[in-house]
Image (tube, rainbow, N blue to C red):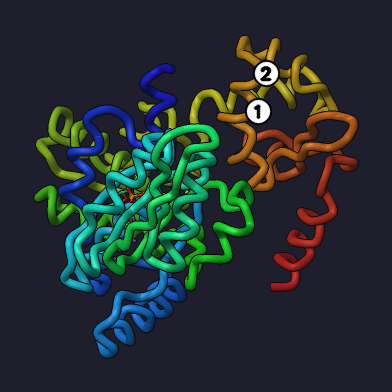
Amino acid sequence: MSSERDLVSPDAEGDEQFIEAALRPKRLEEFIGQARVREQLSLVLQSALRRNRPPDHVLMSGGPGLGKTTLSMIIATELSVPLRITSGPALERAGDLAAILSTLSEGEVLFIDEIHRMARPAEEMLYLAMEDFRVDIVVGKGPGATAIPLEIAPFTLVGATTRAGMLPAPLRDRFGFVAHMDFYSVAELEQVLDRSSRLLAVRLPGDAAHEIAGRSRGTPRIANRLLRRVRDFAEVRADGVVTKDIASAALNLYEVDAEGLDRLDRAVLGALLRKFGGGPVGLSTLAVAVGEEPETVEVVAEPFLVRQGLLARTPRGRVATAAAWVHMGLTPPPDAFGASLLVDLGDDLGQI
Ligand SMILES: Nc1ncnc2c1ncn2[C@@H]1O[C@H](COP(=O)(O)OP(=O)(O)O)[C@@H](O)[C@H]1O
Ligand SMILES: [Mg+2]
């Protein structure tokens, strides 16, 4: 994939993981936004500390880049216990999980990232471990096989998933607390950017932070990434001074627009509007028009366009909303999808 696409991808790419580690808040107090999750989690942790027992298992669900890994590290830090990190895809066999579980120390936090991608046998072993702090190790094969029960130290499982719906119910039910992570508001992202700019020793005025936050798709990971690109631009072109105009010029150069749409997003919307009059048009036709695979359009571009209310998936095909026409600087036709919403807004504005 092209580097400009990576700029607004919510996934961490390559070296980014090292840079991210430096920007991670370490304590719950420093964690920005997600007020409800923070308050709920704080109660869970405090009561566990009072009872001197490991807290209930915690499931964190939400899109990439919203802070799930960060929060799992915070949980271990707040409890002053060690943290073991693994991921669903790494747990192919039950033995992989048994090896980890049997060496956990008392109270340790076990973080399983992408827990929905764990293999079935490991998953079944995990049920028992979560509930009874015990695993059955199967020795031998066929009729002669025996299960040897093995006690494991009480631990706290923290699972993270971008696809909570894909978790089997028996697994989901064994979590005492489910944290739903939402997208961040622009104001919250401004705080993330303010904090990161201090850590990166970049002077970032409030209006410049606002400019970057608005283009960050509700995602701290993207905000931090855009900040680094703006910093690079400012260092080369403006003696390192970041202003609102510099931020906006930098992000325009990288083709991230005012709502966080990148080149592909704009190409999809542009084709939909200019070549198909706003639709409806089938996915494969639309994909051909922008020279991409249908899957790329569907998986990479569309979810954000739909979330922004710029594109709708209808049984007859893809349709641009009236807001999409406006966003692309065009006048929506009167029968555009959702045009009445804009008209209502216009009336409201007229009354002010
Ligand atoms: N609430 C937050 N406050 C400050 N920074 C955050 C927050 N959430 C995420 N980040 C930053 O965004 C980056 C990605 O977060 P991460 O926890 O890896 O996301 P996830 O695991 O959900 O993909 C990290 O570098 C972290 O510093
Ligand atoms: Mg993560």
Is residue 208 visible in the rendered image? The answer is no
- Residue at x 45%, y 54% (from the top left corner): 126
Residue matched to label 2: 294
Q: Quadrant of residue 58?
A: bottom left
Q: Quadrant of residue 273?
A: top right
Q: Nearer the viewer, residue 117 or 291?
A: 117
- Residue at x 61%, y 13% (from the top left corner): 292
Q: Rounded to the nearest whole Å, what is the CA distance between mark 2 and mark 1?
A: 6 Å
Residue type (three-letter) at the residue carrying disc 2: Pro
Residue 110 seen in render:
yes
Where residue 153 appears, as percent x and y from the top left, is 27, 65
Marks 2 and 1 in Cβ contact (< 8 Å) = yes
Image mark count: 2
Identify whether 177 is placed above or below 158.
Answer: below
Residue 56 x, y percent position in the rendering: 41, 73
Which residue has dot 1 on it?
Answer: 298
From the viewer's side, name the closer residue of 288 and 76. Answer: 76
What SS does tag 1 mark? Answer: helix
Looking at the image, residue 302 lies above or below residue 47: above
Q: Is residue 150 left or right of residue 30?
A: right
Q: Can you tell me whether the CB of the residue at mark 2 lies under 8 Å from the nearest atom of ligand 1?
A: no
- The answer to whether residue 119 is left or right of residue 306 is left
Q: Residue flagged by tag 1: what amino acid is it? A: Glu
Residue in the image at 39% along x and 28% along y = 6
User: In the shown orientation, is residue 328 left or right of residue 244?
Assistant: right
Q: Is 46 placed above or below 16 here?
A: below
Q: Where's residue 163, x and y in %?
A: 56, 47
* Secondary structure found at label 2: helix
